[in-house]
Amino acid sequence: MNFAKLTSGAGTLINKARQMTSETLGYAEVTEYDPNLVALITKADKIKVWTERIIKEAEAFLQPNQAARVEDYLSEKLQAQKSNRPTEYESFAQVLLEASIDLGDTTPYGATLNKFGAAQTKIAEEFKNFTQKAREDFVKPMKNFLDVNMAYALKEKKNLEDLRLKLDIVKSKMKKLTSSGKEPDPNDLAKVEDELKVAQTAFDEQSAATTQVMENLASLQADHIIYVKAFVTSQRKFYDDCSAALKNLDQD
């Protein structure tokens, strides 16, 4: 075990904790982010919150049964085959067809139930197609956005915050060294100046990198428009097909 490295890591954590506590209590100066970056981070936070809510409600819309949603989620995570449970549309169609047979599909009511059941079977089929397309073209890419793009942006943001803390720790060391009322040791001063230069450079570079990532994150909303349009196209087709199935029932 590398005890020197372990001790150094522990010291870094202690310094960060001390710096964060001082900032919280208002005892330490905090390096401010560029206003443009602050605006981008704020927008990214909003995008994350609303994307998560949209996905949650979309999944509830496509599968209102919460227990079924949980089962599907676990199957997806465990890469297991999903249950072939009937949808509400399929269950409704099935009971209509069974009723028509039992009551006599040659009777006026039985024949009507049979046609109604056939129409609902068609609607059930189209609903499955719609939900499959909606999940593939809308829910899946939106989740991928959160899992990949947003996760990467948040990682860059965290890296920036870590470097900001390191920079402010060095700034505090410099302030303590130069405001003690006596001439600082030249060697100590040179060492802290070097640390400050390195910390400032690392912070500036990460700030630029984080800004670029956040800008790219905002630009990806153009892709979200494509996902929305794909959902609308699938939904429109579903309703058109449902309407056609019911119109055919009226014509019969």
Image (cartoon, rainbow, N blue to C red):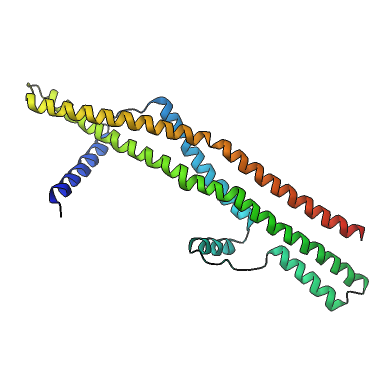
The foreground one among 230 and 111 is: 230
Relative to 46, 94 lies left or right: right
Image position of 207 with respect to 136: above or below? above
Image quadrant where one finds the C terminus: bottom right
Examine the rendering and report whether any part of residue 136 can be seen: yes
Give the x, y percent position of residue 172: 20, 30
Examine the rendering and report whether any part of residue 27 can be seen: no
Relative to 117, 57 lies left or right: left
Residue 246's image quarter?
A: bottom right
Image position of 175 with respect to 160: above or below? above
Q: Residue at x 51, y 39 (%)?
A: 47
Image position of 161 with respect to 134: above or below? above
Give the x, y percent position of residue 79: 50, 63
The foreground one among 33 and 142 is: 142
Give the x, y percent position of residue 155: 38, 42
Give the x, y percent position of residue 203: 30, 31
Q: Residue at x 45, y 31 (%)?
A: 40
Residue 125's image quarter?
A: bottom right
Relative to 61, 239 lies left or right: right
The foreground one among 26 and 129 is: 129
Image quadrant where one finds the N terminus: bottom left
Image position of 239 with respect to 81: above or below? above
Q: Residue at x 30, y 38 (%)?
A: 162
